[in-house]
Image (cartoon, grey):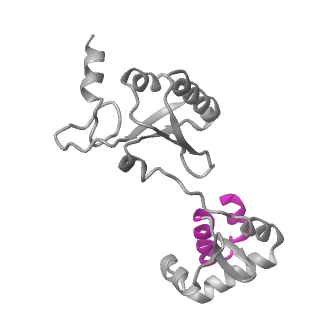
Amino acid sequence: MMLILEEYFKNYPARKKVAEFLFENGLSVKNGKIYLKSAEIPISELSRVIGVNRKIVYHTIEYIEKTPPLKLIFENLQPFPSLVKVAPIMGWEVLELELEKHLYGPALSALIVLLTENKIPIMEIFSKNLSYEEARAYIIIDGTIPVDVFVRLKEIPGFKRLILHTPEKRKENLVCSYCEVRYCPKRVLFEKMTVQ
């Protein structure tokens, strides 16, 4: 998608900034206005948040609506609600995985199979493999992931890095050397497994 925006907005950097913001936030353009689902977004507030003047936002809307491929895309944009930030508050863990681009499909598939075989309840999967950014998958699970499954994640071909967002709140827990997590309830168990 960013290549499409790059092509159509290459001569308009300020408009491109607006279009990228609209796309990244799932804001649609219809009938000369900008919408979040069916709620109209005020142009003045949008221009303030993006850091451009209102005229640039109006020119971007006009340009999108007179360019058929852009109009087709921007008319149909929708925001995607995600539980990623809310999950730890709800007592769920979020596995944020960075994957190799060329092994993205097989790695994601193997990951889902691993979780399913171990009867780990998946609440939500959110994943992106766009050309301009790292391939990532966010998997929200109900509860916490068992240590043996946690250790096997690293064995998946295409796995690069794991960040675990956990409901653990005790400040005395140390940073885990296995993953990038602030408070890791699995740290002690993982260290015991590697010693044996």
Where, by quadrant of the figure, is residue 1 drawn? bottom right
Q: Residue at x 59, y 52 (%)?
A: 132
Stretch in magenta = 1-25
Q: Is 140 situated left or right of 5 in this image?
A: left
Q: Quadrant of the C terminus?
A: top left
Question: Compared with residue 137, is residue 58 higher up or lower down, i.e. above or below?
Answer: below
Residue 136's spot in the image, x, y percent? Answer: 53, 43
- Total residue callouts: 0
Nearer-the-camera pick, 101 or 187:
187
Establish if 150 lies above or below 18.
Answer: above
Residue furthest out toward the bottom: 55
Q: Residue at x 42, y 53 (%)?
A: 86
Q: Residue furthest top?
A: 196
In the image, farthest residue toward the right: 68
Residue 3, image quadrant = bottom right
The percent coordinates of residue 181 (x first, y second) are 32, 40
Decide which of 111, 10 is in the foreground and name it.
Answer: 111
Name the one closer to the observer, 85 or 96.
85
User: Seen in the image, is 131 located left or right of residue 83?
Assistant: right
Image location of residue 77, percent across then percent down? 69, 64
The magenta stretch spans residue 16: yes
Which secondary structure dominates the residues rendered in magenta? helix
Residue drawn at the location 59% of the way across and 79% of the way down: 41
Classify residue 180 as left or right of residue 13.
Answer: left
Q: Measured from the top left, where is residue 158 in percent x and y?
A: 55, 30
Q: What residue is shown at x 30% (from left), y 16% (from top)?
A: 193
11 lies left or right of 86: right
Is 87 magenta? The answer is no
